[in-house]
Amino acid sequence: MANERTAGLSLIYRLELQNSSNTFGKVAQIIGEEGGDIIGVDVVHVDKDHSIRDVNVNVFDRRHGKVIRERLEEAEGIHVVNLSDRTMLMHLGGKIEIRSKIPVRNRDELARVYTPHVATICEAIHEDPSKAFKLTIKKNTVAVVSDGTAVLGLGDIGPYAAMPVMEGKAMLFKQFAGVDAFPICLDTKDTEAIIAHIKAIAPAFGGINLEDISSPRCFEIEARLKEELDIPVFHDDQHGTAVVLLAGLMNACKLVGKQLEDLKVVVTGIGAAGIACTKMLLLAGVRNIMGVDRMGVISRNHEYENPMWQWYAEHTNPNNLEGTLSDVIKGADVFIGVSGPGVLTVEHLQSMAQDPIVFAMANPNPEIDPDVAAPYVRVMATGRSDYPNQINNLLCFPSIFKGALDCRASDINEEMKLAASHAIASTVSDEELSEHYIIPSVFNKKVVQAVRLAVIEAAYRTGVARRRYRDYSDKQ
Ligand SMILES: NC(=O)C1=CN([C@@H]2O[C@H](COP(=O)(O)OP(=O)(O)OC[C@H]3O[C@@H](n4cnc5c(N)ncnc54)[C@H](O)[C@@H]3O)[C@@H](O)[C@H]2O)C=CC1
Ligand SMILES: CC(=O)C(=O)O
Ligand SMILES: [Mg+2]
């Protein structure tokens, strides 16, 4: 992508430089000539003849980084000791750890947190299992569970490779909403085994966040767990994405002066995210939605093996159109992409209705490069952190779970999700609303609190909150 440098590869060149002949000047010249961007320099060691410096450089990609390395190695007085990648360094040893809340400084404290006195706590929970919410980490802890089959847009990369994403989600739960979350990657793709394993670990957790499990298995896994567990189960790729998408779309419509019920919407990628986004839009009043996957537009002229596509055919595409994206994008007000890079072209954008709204949300690379799309769209959003209008489930999953945990909800239902969408949308005031600001930043602290309170209110209203309202409201 055109501005990949800003969020792309950041390398650290550890250089040994001879003190004599203006070697750092040469370093800066070579990096500049090759189009690298020096963003920092640390002096690691200096002696009479040499200095060792870490030079932090933003490059386009690994090949670009290698070219710079080769140029530096050719220069007199410069020796490349090591080349490392800042992202890789941030992941050394993983991104999270467990810490104790209470110090254990002596035998008396040891006897209380552990045996023998911990036994009284165990007995209390044995007598009344609901006390697990009061006396264990269950109160504020979520399991982030994946089988590694649909990791970002990378596909089925397996449970080991999925861990960095799940650790990242756990980290974000804590940072954005104070929820403790634990990453769990299961080494099985078997639906029944996944359901059984999650049920078996559920006692420790107040909620289950399913992540990056491929469709259509994700639908059955979630539905069964929702039915068989008494804690909220939420497939983030479905519902988190749908909640934030609806918030962004409501604000985009306000900006361009269109109503949800009048929109013609095209969704590409009818998997976990695409189906959930469609359901959410239908719930919010959108009537004309068409879904496109690899084999074309989903219509009632076909029989689908995937039961969710059968459902999709029956509930969308009111005019039962057929064809490809090029056929149905003509005259569309909104494009929603949860498929993969390169799906959307400038020709597609040129054929859309006036004031096109484009949410190209595939990660890590959207359906169209936002810089390429910019001249042809009124509102552009992606799932990425390095462009304006980030439509990413991160904007809601920490706070939705925080709300659900705080009122001890047994479920995260449609009303709670809709309430979360409205809460997110309402944090952008009319004065703030613009083409580049339809959705608040994930760092906007008002969002977490607004979503948490809206979710709690909807949970009490719909009868899924299990903490007595008096106990909850007294502590607010
Ligand atoms: N911005 C955000 O918050 C989120 C973004 N995503 C992104 O959305 C994408 C899909 O994620 P999931 O729904 O979880 O995966 P999924 O595997 O459940 O579904 C993906 C669907 O897209 C279809 N697809 C792939 N390439 C296509 C193409 N060229 N044309 C038409 N259809 C195509 C697949 O056949 C599949 O049906 C990924 O890139 C993911 O990173 C997913 C969740 C949240
Ligand atoms: C954001 C996210 O959950 C995904 O891209 O899968
Ligand atoms: Mg995901």
Image (cartoon, rainbow, N blue to C red):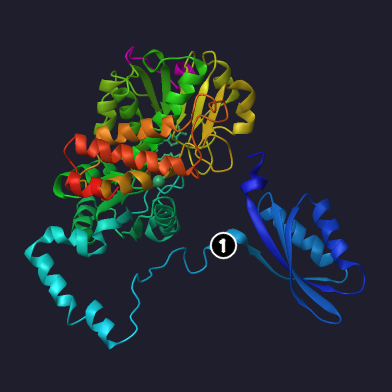
Q: Could you tell me residue 193's position as x and y percent?
A: 21, 56
The stretch in magenta equals: 318-329
206 displayed left or right of 57: left
- Residue corresponding to mark 1: 88
Q: Residue at x 55, y 63 (%)?
A: 90
Q: Main secondary structure of the magenta part?
A: loop
The picture quadrant for ligand 2 comes to top left
Relative placement, left or right, of 191 versus 40 is left
Residue 401 x %, y %: 31, 47
* In the image, residue 204 above or below residue 384: below
Report if residue 321 lies within the magenta region.
Answer: yes
Q: Residue furthest left?
A: 127
Is residue 203 shown to the viewer in this render?
Answer: no
Question: Relative to residue 185, is residue 378 depicted above or below?
Answer: above
Judge: label 1 CB < 8 Å from ligand 2. no
Name the one closer to the observer, 272 or 287.
Answer: 287
Mark 1, Cα crowd under 10 Å, few <14 / some 14-19 / many 20+, is: few
Q: Quadrant of residue 217?
A: top left
| Residue at image coords 20%, 38% | 460
Picture coordinates of residue 316 (x, y %)? 31, 20
**Vertical placement of 128 versus 117: above or below?**
above
What is the residue that sits farthest to the front in this orientation? 474
- With 65 as the anchor, is 100 left or right in this view? left
Q: Is residue 390 magenta?
A: no
Which corner quadrant of the image does residue 279 belong to?
top left
Question: With 61 as the anchor, is 240 left or right in this view?
Answer: left
